[in-house]
């Protein structure tokens, strides 16, 4: 039977802003409490003791895979990392049946998949919390870590200006969700052919966020507190799009010249993995305003808070 107190973590726009704030604050507390400890040390609190978490990957991953696995262990739980290709899921068993079966073995499911419909169907039929570890449409865990990272360096993100340069992809979409929920302004700059779905923009605007589309990257970054980019070709994009996308996106590379048009203290973020000197130059990635490795670290802390929230712990 479904535990009605459990929470799925499917997308940032589906969770109340007060809850999102609690998750970020909790992540920071847990991070602070661990300062200086070896990574394998268990947290003082063990809310996942006795819990088994399935981590399902239908696409490659370094950060999501390792940070969830380490996070569960630090909280006292155990993990099972599963490749979608090796499961019956990839060979005709329905998602609904998979969700029902897994719910008999594990206490929580994190899934990285292609179609959003797979995630939603898993959540609908699972009796345990389901966490979105990236779909073709969104990447909410990444943006929770990014908000946490921004606030560690610059204080509250509310009212700040975030500029996304490049492809209007899944990571951008979760930034748009977050703009509406956390109340920051968001400008997308990229070619029209790679615009994000307008629905993401309209939803954030309806929540009061000033979301703009600006084709000129130099104009776009004016007044930016944070400049973000991501790979030009995502895992779900067909590899043959590579050459066309590179031509379309070259003008949107984040380099020192572009960053010079943003605020002097503007941070630079990239969820990684990056293609150095394509979407962003190494000069920017390794520069003093870049916080890319803090973002990667904060995946761990933010997701620990997400998992505790899912289980009401
Ligand atoms: N940023 C991110 O999700 O990285 P991985 O694909 O390595 O998990
Ligand atoms: N937009 C990228 C993000 C990877 C973490 C992708 O979906 O491949």
Image (tube, grey):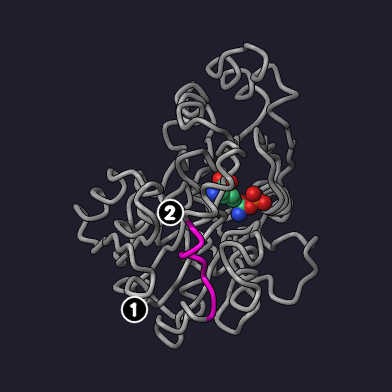
Question: Which mark identifies residue 122?
Answer: none
- Residue identifier under label 2: 172
- Residue identifier under label 1: 222
State the residue in front, 37 or 158: 158
Q: Do the residues labelled 1 and 2 touch (CB within 8 Å)?
A: no
The residue lying at 68 percent from left, 70 percent from top is 34
Instruction: From the viewer's perspective, tell me whether residue 189 is left or right of residue 271.
Output: left
Q: Position of residue 71 (x, y in %)?
A: 68, 54
Q: Position of residue 296 (x, y in %)?
A: 63, 63
- Tag 2, which secondary structure? helix
Membership of 54 in magenta stretch: no
Q: Where is residue 246 in the image (x, y as percent from the top left)?
A: 55, 54
Frontmost of labels 1 and 2 is: 1
Badge 1: few (under 14), some or many (20 or more) residues near its Cα, within 10 Å?
some
- Tag 1, which secondary structure? loop
Tell me: is circle 2 under 8 Å from ligand 2. Answer: no
The image quadrant of residue 52 is top right
The residue lying at 60 percent from left, 66 percent from top is 30
Instruction: From the viewer's perspective, tell me whether residue 51 is left or right of residue 26.
Output: right
Magenta residue span:
249-256
Tell me: is circle 1 under 8 Å from ligand 2. Answer: no
Above or below 155: residue 90:
above
The residue lying at 57 percent from left, 18 percent from top is 100
Inter-mark Cα distance, 1 to 2? 19 Å
Q: Where is residue 264 in the image (x, y as percent from the top left)?
A: 44, 88
Above or below 93: residue 54:
below
Dominant secondary-structure state across the stretch colored magenta: helix
């Amino acid at each position: 039977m479904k535990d009605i107190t459990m929470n799925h973590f499917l997308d940032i726009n589906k969770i109340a802003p007060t809850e999102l704030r609690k998750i970020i604050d909790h992540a920071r507390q847990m991070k602070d409490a661990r300062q200086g400890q070896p990574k394998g040390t268990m947290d003082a609190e063990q809310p996942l003791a006795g819990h088994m978490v399935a981590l399902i990957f239908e696409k490659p991953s370094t950060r999501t895979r390792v940070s969830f696995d380490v996070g569960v262990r630090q909280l006292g739980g155990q993990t099972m990392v599963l490749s979608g290709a090796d499961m019956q899921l990839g060979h005709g068993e329905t998602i609904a049946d998979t969700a029902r079966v897994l719910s008999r073995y594990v206490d929580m499911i994190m899934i990285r998949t292609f179609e959003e419909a797979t995630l939603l169907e898993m959540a609908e039929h699972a009796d345990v919390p389901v966490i979105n570890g990236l779909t073709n449409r969104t990447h909410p865990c990444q943006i929770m870590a990014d908000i946490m990272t921004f606030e560690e360096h610059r204080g509250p993100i509310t009212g700040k200006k975030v500029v996304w340069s490049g492809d209007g992809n899944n990571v951008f979409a979760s930034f748009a969700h977050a703009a509406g929920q956390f109340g920051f302004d968001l400008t997308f700059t990229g070619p029209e052919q790679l615009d994000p779905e307008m629905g993401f923009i309209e939803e954030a605007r309806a929540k009061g966020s000033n979301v703009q589309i600006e084709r000129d990257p130099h104009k776009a970054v004016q007044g930016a507190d944070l400049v973000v980019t991501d790979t030009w070709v995502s895992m779900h994009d067909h590899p043959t799009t590579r050459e066309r996308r590179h031509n379309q996106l070259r003008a949107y590379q984040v380099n020192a010249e572009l960053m010079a048009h943003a605020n002097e203290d503007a941070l630079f973020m990239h969820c990684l993995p990056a293609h150095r000197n394509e979407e962003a130059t190494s000069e920017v990635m390794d520069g003093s305003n870049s916080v890319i490795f803090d973002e990667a670290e904060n995946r761990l802390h933010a997701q620990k808070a997400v998992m505790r929230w899912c289980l009401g712990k």
